[in-house]
Amino acid sequence: MKKEIILWLSSLIIVFILGYLKNVTDKDYPVTGTFGIDGKKVSYKLDKVSYDKKSYKNIIISDIKGITANILLKNDELQNKIIYKEIDRGLEAEIPNLEPGKNVEYKVMISYNDKTFEIPKDDYLTLTFWGSIPTAIIILNFIFIYGGLVMAIRCLFESLTKKSYLKKFAIINCTLFITLITIVYPLYNTYKLGAINHFVPPFGDLINPLLTAILFVWIIATILIFNKKYPETVTIVATAATILIYFIF
């Protein structure tokens, strides 16, 4: 029993690390930073994706009084400058929503006395707008994606130890990815595209080729495992392929 707990905890820890690495290396990871003005900190976070219902809200955190800022936009559909308003411990500005899938290029200009800070320096960030996704759908999508990764790692550990539950774990993993691909992800993407009560999205927009590839990998691996065709090697290859595809996803 103790060994089982250790293997499950190890699987969870490895997936947590993989998830962290995936997030910080993702192209949509926000630009964050902190710099000092007169000995006080100014912190910012500039997102590259927005799922907000009405507008994208950006907040600059600072204890400095008299600091001002504005957002410069490069988009014909919106005004080219949005001024931040003062709030408790900082500044706040909102970029009006565009249709799902559309984007706007923006940068932030922060001023204090005769100093101006341009973020990012000599460049613009691209902010892409998507439809608002219900929290329950986000949680389900998270559970099935990371649940599949946990089961993949757990299958790997099982194949290298007693192999008692390898067949069972492989079937569970296939079931997780089948449910994700056929139900959860299409629903997630329907909300993301803003299609609910508006239009029926194309079939190609409701499936993810990379998630489908992971499912096919585990279907083939499960068949080979049940036929006792090199279960250790098959599970190692399937798990490695799953992690590789996950980082491309």
Image (cartoon, helix red, strand yellow):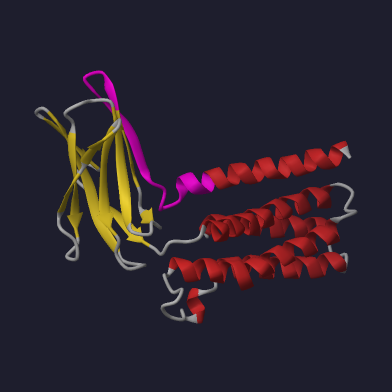
Viewport quadrant of the N terminus: top right
Residue 232 lies in quadrant: bottom right
Along the viewing direction, whichever of 72 and 165 lies nearer the viewer? 72
User: Is residue 233 rendered to the left or right of residue 43?
Assistant: right
Which residue appears at 67% of the width and 40% of the height?
Answer: 13
Determine which quarter of the picture holds residue 31: top left
**Residue 181's spot in the image, x, y percent?**
61, 70
Nearest to the observer: residue 48 or residue 193: 193
Q: Which residues are magenta?
A: 21-41
| Membership of 60 in magenta stretch | no
Furthest residue to the front?
88
Magenta stretch: residue 37 in it?
Answer: yes
Residue 105, horizontal then vertical, whole percent: 24, 56
Whether residue 208 can be seen here: no
Q: Is residue 76 left or right of residue 208?
A: left
Q: Which is nearer the eye, 94 or 182?
A: 94
> In the displayed structure, would residue 3 be above or below residue 64?
below
Query: Residue visible at 73% across and 61% down?
Result: 173
The tally of labels here is 0
Q: Is residue 24 left or right of residue 55?
A: right
Residue at 85% x, 38% y: name it: 3
The residue lying toward the viewer, choosing from 162 and 100, is: 100
**Residue sticking out furthest to the top:** 39
Residue 19, compared with residue 175, is above or below; it is: above
Query: Residue 228's spot in the image, x, y percent?
Result: 88, 65
Q: Quadrant of residue 61?
A: top left
